Amino acid sequence: MKKNRINYTAYLDRIQSPEKASLLIKNNDVLGVSGFTKAGDSKAVLPKVAQRALYEDVKVTVLSGASLGYNTDADLAKNGALHKRMPFQADPTLRKSINSHEVLYVDQHLGQTADMLQHVDTFKIDVAIIEAVSITKDGYIIPTTSVGNSPVFADKAEKIIIEINTSFPESLEGIHDIKFLKKQPHRDIIPVLHSDTKIGVPYIKIDPEKVAAIVFTEVPDSPAIISDPDEKTTAISNHILQFLGKEVDEGRLTESLLPLQAGIGKTANAILSGFVNSRFKDLTMYSEVLQDSTFELFDSGKLLFASASSITVTEECSKKVFNNFEDYKDKLLLRPQNISNAAEVISRLGVIGINTAIEFDIYGNVNSTHITGTKMMNGIGGSGDFARNGYLSIFACPSISKEGRISHIVPMVSHTDHTEHDVDILVTEQGLADIRGIAPIERAKVIIENCVHPEYKEQLMNYFTEASKLGGHTPHILEETLSWHTNLKTHGTMKIEEFAIH
């Protein structure tokens, strides 16, 4: 029955075990693997590469769409199988190896990886490993729950390994809209005019001669782990909903808003869930990832259509969605990430981007990636693609954490991913700061008043007041700009009064 998913008979004699297929991967190879935020990734062959590294010399560079599921990144890192990783990861073990310089990491805007591969001819892909739900009669790949960078990986690769995953229903065929973009400057306009515009084909076109192995697996995607909305995330969601409601009341938006984009994780999911009981209706999404909240919005009747590059949901949501997939099939599309994250399309559609921050400063600069400026957390992902090009750029985070020892609003961010020029709205559970069209010294007052936790408000205002005495368009006391971070490292808290008395 599994072979029924292969409609190209020439592939039948290329069926192999995952162990044998993994031997096609050699030391120092560069791998392009499917997978975007745990969805549609290699669950058979790449884990075998990690196992091989325990007893032989095999070290590879791995490119993907975004993060991989299960323990794949962790096993590659701890077994010494990983030389370089890009453009995104979210694994604690790999993170540790990156920060200790055991693994090289290239943190990249997710919309730019495919362009880099097309333009840097010396960056070859030795082997592409692509997950599929089935194979067409022409030998082309029907992906599973993500598209990511798979089209460009398959195009650039010397060899292709296809993992056919029978845990997914064949009814996934038809939800993918795959358009291969030409190399710049010969690229055509990307004619996506609405979230539901189809511009491509429902398969990844490949050269069948490059297919070196077919592997079967029935391992489902690694389930997303998303906490229920709490007091802070609910407050953040409410502030954003109130702001958008005001935009409607003042005539800048309608109750259908504009296409929504949201990052992945607890805060982003909670923000989108808040739309279920909101005044808004007939919503659309043009995003990277469809989470549980997307399907909540479908079920509530609030959301008409969603376009993204992957479906990443919890185990409970996965069962509901894929056991009743016909209820959702005509409401969504999955695209390559250089289209889901394309500046041209994001700008044309006027996407409202909602992303999360590690910290932001009093002038509106945002750090999304580095703890205390040096230690990589996950990566910039696609937040920059949407922040720079969307109609509205919203960044959210809690005002404090670690029992109040850390303020997430600081004098100056310890690492800048999104400059003040690309940020429109900042929000914490304390409130929301609209910093559109106001000068730096105006921004500082609005951010401190609306977003900072009461425990830090006076301390931050004192800094700004003293800095302002020195003048400058963006006032700072250079000797103190990162003092909050150094105080945290030295004394375990950013609160001056708590360590000053010791």
Image (cartoon, helix red, strand yellow):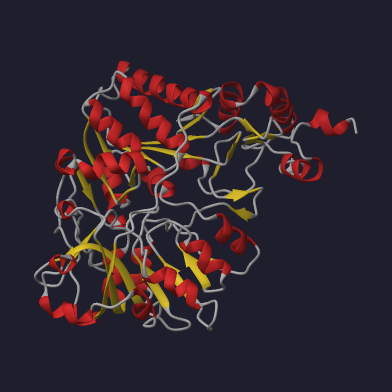
- The quarter of the image holding the C terminus is top right
Residue occupying the far right of the picture: 502
Residue occupying the far top of the picture: 249
Q: Is residue 44 above or below residue 337?
A: below
Query: Residue placed at 40% from the left, 35% from the top?
Result: 269
Residue occupying the far front of the picture: 1
Query: Residue placed at 62% from the left, 69% from the top?
Result: 102
Q: Is residue 415 above or below residue 356?
A: below
Viewer-side residue, 494 vs 39:
39
Rendering quarter of residue 38: bottom left
Viewer-side residue, 402 vs 17:
17
Classify residue 462 as left or right of residue 294.
right
Q: Position of residue 130 (x, y in %)?
A: 30, 67
Q: Is residue 391 visible?
A: no
Classify residue 423 as left or right of residue 294.
right
- The quarter of the image holding the N terminus is bottom left
Q: Position of residue 446 (x, y in %)?
A: 56, 24
Q: Position of residue 416 (x, y in %)?
A: 57, 48
Q: Is residue 399 visible?
A: yes
Q: Is residue 101 above or below residue 335?
A: below
Q: Position of residue 53 (x, y in %)?
A: 52, 77
Rendering quarter of residue 24: bottom left
